[in-house]
Image (cartoon, grey):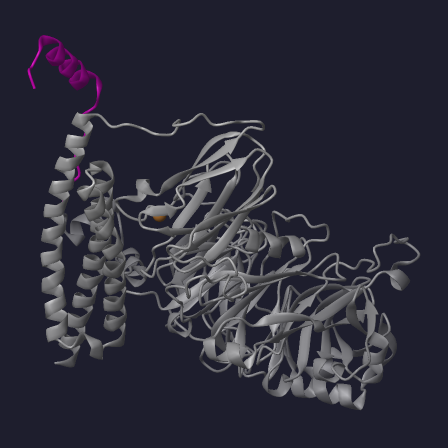
Amino acid sequence: MKITKRFLSLSLIALLVIPAYKPAIAQQTLDEVKKARGLSDADVLAAVKTFMPRGGRDEYFGFVGSGNSGTMIVYGLPSMRIYKYVGVFSPEPWQGYGFDDESSLMLKKASLDDRINTYGDMRYPAFSETNGLYNGKYLFFSDGANSRIALLGLDDFETKQVLSHPLFVSTFPGVAVTPNTEYVIQTSQFPSTWDGKSADVENEFDTKFKSGITFWKFEESAEEMKTGHMGRLLKEKTFTLQLPPYTLGYFDVGKGNGDGLLVGVAAKNQHNYVYVVDYKKLTGLKTSQINNANVVSYLDALKANAIAMVEIPFPATMVKVTPKGKYFIAVGDNTSVFDFSKVKDAMTNKTFIADRAAGGIPIIDAQGVEHGTINLGNGVVDVAFEYRPNVAYASAFDDKKIVRWNYETMKKEGELTLDFKPGQLMVPQGMSEQPHSNYLTVVDKEGLYDNFVSTGPIRPSFQHLIDISSDDMADLYTMSLPQCNLYGSVAVLRTTIKPIIRYPTGTNTRTGETSRYKTVAGKEKVERLGNRVHIFGTLIRSHITPEIVEVNEGDIVTFHLTNLELAEDETHGFTIDTYGKHGSFEPGKTASLTFVADRPGAFPYYCTEFCSALHLEMEGILMIKPKGYKAKAGESEIKLTEEQLAEYKKNYEAKLEVISQTQDIINSVVTWLKDNNYQDYPYVKALVEDAVDQLNKAAKAKENYEKYANEGKWKDAFLWTEQYWQYQVKAADVGLRAKKLLQEKLEEGK
Ligand SMILES: [Cu+2]
């Protein structure tokens, strides 16, 4: 730089005005960092326990509902890193959920008036189970705000089914599943009428208002069992137990001694209960139809001795079944443990409190079926279990404490004082028959932090990761969860879930079937019938085909797009500028975008994911011709100048040089892989197949660039060399990953 007087004077002013900036000392030692940041040994230990080194994998997948945002959040434990937000009850633009036709149709069908609900209230999810253990295949959510239920597939982390409840107006925002996922259970929350008519709350509450428990039938076909993940909730095989007007809360399914029973929080006329329903007895009872739903009357359930109430002296926030199913525990101002065997006996022998009934349902005397009661602190919100027999945790909200206790001996075993008010608790695998240990998550119901930046009047939700592996419990990490009002969560061993990398080409991912709009390379076309236009297009680096689409103002247009990629994580997005149409196309996926072309003009469409260095080439244009438009001859031809042509020719030749060098790299990798018998290692083999697929696609690009070079069309020739090189780079990249993996395998084998 030429130093001018002006520059010098400016620098001097800067020196005088700006306080001296002390640069951080690079690459400090651990001790120096500890000192500089004021960290204790305990701080460093906590940090090290959640740190995920390169190549490390989280031990568990955690799932929470975002509450009113209507999305699910996927995170890892112990790193507490958020991996994904998945649209469930509300649209989610990144993955095109509620934007493409397939998911929009699903959401519209799940509303009462064919509109897409744009929020939810999802608090307590449940995993699918086999023999009382999480099988890692599905997850279920209840929408308390709009009375819906959702099924998610965990092979691709997508919502597969959303159904509207045919009866409930107010729904509890949680679900529970039976030990083999025969039923997914959802209940009402506040009583309401079921016939869409208003009623007199004062005088007709007991006769016209209802509550209920719905047993959604869940099934996988034999074929689906083999391939995995397209089970369905079946409305026609689902039934609802109609109850008198209780306010219903959290519930859980029995196992072990409690097998076949459902227990949950109920309240009516200032009395508090735990309801006990013998659901296996309900399946044989006659049903009537309300709103096309199968309904079992509680009067019939009473005759079958399938329902009773246990009255408890405090309002319960939570009722949970212990892992082996010996007890169920109700928590609130007090904590009561009930013995399933005694409850079963009481129901069989009809040892009910004489002359009293809860809205017609007999009451079991709590003292007769209780194992014990213990005071674990003030305002206990939740209870969670760990792997050691009979050990549980309780969150004492008002005392800011986590209490470890034993529900067999009814004794406290330890406690951890917190600097926040604790809410819901979760231990990985904790609602299965085999809870794990080491970690407990605690929802922070206060969120007032000295050490957090303020984001204005509304803050994110927080949850803490507590180390429970020893008697010294420790608060390791505070995780913030944005756009979320946090309640319950669940976590499963990471290895229990088997995520896929790609779909078979042309898959409608909502149904799992091959889409009838599947389009393969070379078969792209535009079909027109009157004012209905169907575009069958494909997406692959680095082209959207077709690149130009012409329609008339007023046409109803559908883009049916198929992502032809096989490569890992090679998603293409698709957006039509200013038309509000957007989709996400993961490898193999086919989805459709329908709209009325009601504004004339030229609308570029493009790929919204950065998919390769030539990502910007993934574009095209939608011409919407105004009514009455006539094109002039030769209008769309663009002539290049001699200089421009020469420039393209030069670029073309340079690119050929790069292609040749890249090929040398690929050849050396291929030789190495062959010499080391890559085909004996399935995952390495799959990677090599990916690479070969890329090179096969490249062949067509080579044909094109040679053809255009022969014709002297240097721009096209150059663009096709770019395309060819993109395939090569991807092939080389995949090949190198295969090599690295094989090297690791060979090391292991030594
Ligand atoms: Cu792309």
Q: Is residue 25 among what the camera can see?
A: no
Residue 29 in the figure: left or right of residue 277: left
Residue reaching furthest to the left: 2
Image: magenta residue range = 1-26
Q: Residue 15: say if magenta.
A: yes
Q: Residue 733: say if magenta.
A: no
Residue reaching furthest to the right: 203
Up-down: is 675 above or below 506? below
Quadrant containing the C terminus is: bottom left
Up-down: is 585 above or below 186? above
Q: Residue at x 73, y 89 (%)?
A: 345
Residue 473 in the figure: left or right of residue 617: right
Which x, y percent locates residue 620? Answer: 39, 39
Which x, y percent locates residue 500? Answer: 39, 67
Up-down: is 364 above or below 148? below
Residue 673 in the figure: left or right of residue 150: left
Q: Quadrant of residue 272?
A: bottom right
